[in-house]
């Protein structure tokens, strides 16, 4: 979501006449887009702010104008100026359409410019081709914010309530991307399957049990080659999503379904809204698909009150689900969330120990899953030349696996059938079939 926000900010700035540079030393303005999901991400901000000032001083140059965007900006607002005098302006998560104004005001000498206000009605969600993170893959936001208030999570506070974008606009957006030569779109949102637009305009001809599965069918009908979506919220994961994937080849065979814990007791304190039993029902439905759907997840270890037995339940879950990959996080207390009031009683050493134990088990199963791809042919979007091996192309399969294969730059942007011959820690290797 942050990458997508940055792409839109760059698009708006370029339209307003600014030149975008990735060379910090050449920049008159530096924008830092921030994340506050864990404390570590927040700390990074102050390290980067310090680096920007120091680098300018070392060059004997004036410090560039420094603007802070994103979740930390939204949550901390003006208090950021007190934390670092190098910061010139602060732009909240919904004010990203007005960065040009912040730059102008700051250049005109206005100090401590802060905009934490709402998104403008006319906000443009599309991105100019020149500002996309990839020439072949595009993000399409379908829902912003979050209403779930999981007790550990800061997102509902930093990104506000859920707001679903009109289906007709989303479908038009995908049509446009297809015409521009984009091969793969990612429908994105904190919880895409909680998609609830104000009207069904644009979905009339597409059946489905939920607005999200209807939207999937509507986007599939555009004929764009690959459609991925992330993140799915387990409680709202209707079986009809799997039906839609079974019906449409261009809906990719990958589901990211964050479970967070294998213990019902912990899930209840996290206020996730699902139990392990209903999570596993969804997993079974996904695994029963006519397609081989890759599964990925997020897990938090060391949530307040997590006992060894609770943690063991998480290990058991990982054993059952056989995830293609999983992001494991150590619980990080976030001020302002309900869980912040609970004693953070799993010691740092214990969190690390559980993190490593879980990571080892996940990797063990992941390797078995990866080996299962050997001798199979997967469709890979050739996205870039491999950084480590310039004679190889790197891309993603429809199931979101990273696949490398021998090839040259004339293949970039094409979808290639690759037969897998080897698997390593995080990558599959193959040859053109
Ligand atoms: N909306 C998605 C969902 O509910 O599955 C996840 C979005 S959240 C920004 C990404 C991940 O960060 C979560 O799935 C969770 O595992 C992790 N996370 C969120 N708050 C955390 C915290 N306080 N400590 C550690 N990990 C956290
Ligand atoms: Fe955070 Fe829960 Fe919302 Fe995901 S669903 S963004 S974890 S509050």
Image (cartoon, helix red, strand yellow):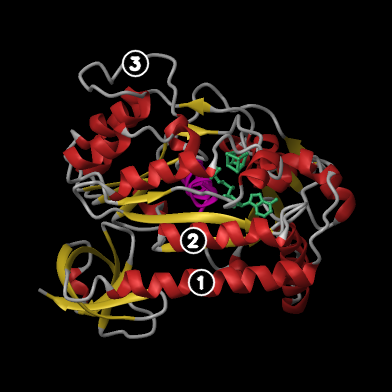
Percent x, y of residue 218: 24, 29
Q: State whether label 3 is within 8 Å of ligand 2.
A: no
Mark 3 lies on residue: 200
Query: Residue 207's image quarter?
Result: top left
Mark 1 lies on residue: 361
Q: Secondary structure at mark 2?
A: helix
Side of 66 relative to 139 (left or right): right
Is 18 covered by the magenta stretch?
Answer: yes
Q: Nearer the viewer, mark 3 or mark 2?
A: 2
> Alpha-carbon neighbours of circle 1 within 10 Å: few (<14), some, or many (≥20)?
some
Q: Which mark is residue 111?
A: none
Query: Residue 214's image quarter?
Result: top left
Q: Quadrant of the C terminus?
A: bottom left
Side of 363 relative to 49 (left or right): left
Percent x, y of residue 49: 75, 62
Question: Which one is earlier in the sequence, the residue at label 1 or at label 2?
Answer: 2
């Amino acid at each position: 979501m942050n990458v997508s926000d940055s792409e839109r900010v760059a698009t708006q700035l370029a339209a307003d006449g600014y030149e975008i540079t990735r060379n910090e030393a050449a920049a008159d303005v530096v924008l830092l887009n921030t994340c506050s999901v864990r404390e570590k991400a927040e700390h990074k901000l102050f390290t980067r702010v310090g680096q920007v000032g120091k680098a300018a001083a070392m060059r004997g140059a004036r410090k560039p104008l420094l603007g802070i965007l994103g979740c930390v900006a939204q949550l901390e607002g003006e208090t950021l100026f007190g934390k670092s005098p190098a910061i010139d302006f602060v732009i909240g998560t919904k004010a990203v359409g007005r960065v040009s104004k912040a730059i102008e005001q700051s250049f005109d000498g206005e100090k401590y410019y802060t905009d934490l206000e709402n998104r403008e009605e006319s906000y443009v969600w599309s991105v100019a081709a020149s500002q996309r993170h990839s020439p072949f893959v595009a993000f399409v936001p379908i829902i912003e914010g979050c209403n779930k208030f999981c007790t550990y999570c800061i997102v509902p506070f930093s990104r506000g309530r859920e707001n679903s974008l009109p289906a007709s606009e989303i479908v038009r957006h995908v049509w446009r991307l297809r015409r521009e030569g984009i091969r793969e779109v990612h429908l994105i949102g904190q919880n895409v399957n909680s998609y609830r637009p104000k009207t069904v305009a644009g979905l009339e001809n597409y059946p489905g049990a939920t607005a999200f599965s209807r939207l999937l069918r509507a986007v599939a009908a555009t004929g764009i080659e690959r459609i991925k979506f992330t993140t799915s919220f387990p409680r709202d994961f209707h079986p009809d999503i799997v039906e839609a994937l079974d019906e449409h080849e261009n809906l990719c065979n990958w589901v990211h379904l964050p479970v967070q814990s294998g213990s019902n007791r912990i899930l209840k304190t996290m206020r996730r809204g699902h139990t392990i039993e209903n999570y596993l029902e969804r997993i079974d439905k996904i695994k029963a698909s006519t397609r081989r759907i890759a599964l990925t997840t997020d897990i938090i270890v060391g949530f307040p009150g997590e006992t060894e037995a609770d943690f063991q339940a998480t290990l058991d879950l990982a054993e059952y689900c056989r995830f293609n990959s999983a992001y494991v996080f150590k619980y990080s207390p976030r001020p302002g969330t309900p869980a912040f009031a609970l004693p953070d009683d799993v010691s740092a050493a214990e969190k690390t120990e559980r993190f490593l134990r879980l990571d080892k088990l996940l990797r063990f199963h992941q390797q078995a899953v990866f080996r299962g791809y050997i001798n199979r042919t997967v469709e890979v979007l050739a996205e870039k030349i491999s950084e480590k091996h310039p004679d190889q192309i790197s891309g993603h399969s429809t199931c979101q696996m990273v696949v490398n294969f021998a090839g040259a730059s004339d293949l970039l942007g094409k979808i290639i059938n690759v037969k897998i011959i080897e698997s390593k820690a995080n990558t599959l290797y193959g040859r053109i079939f």
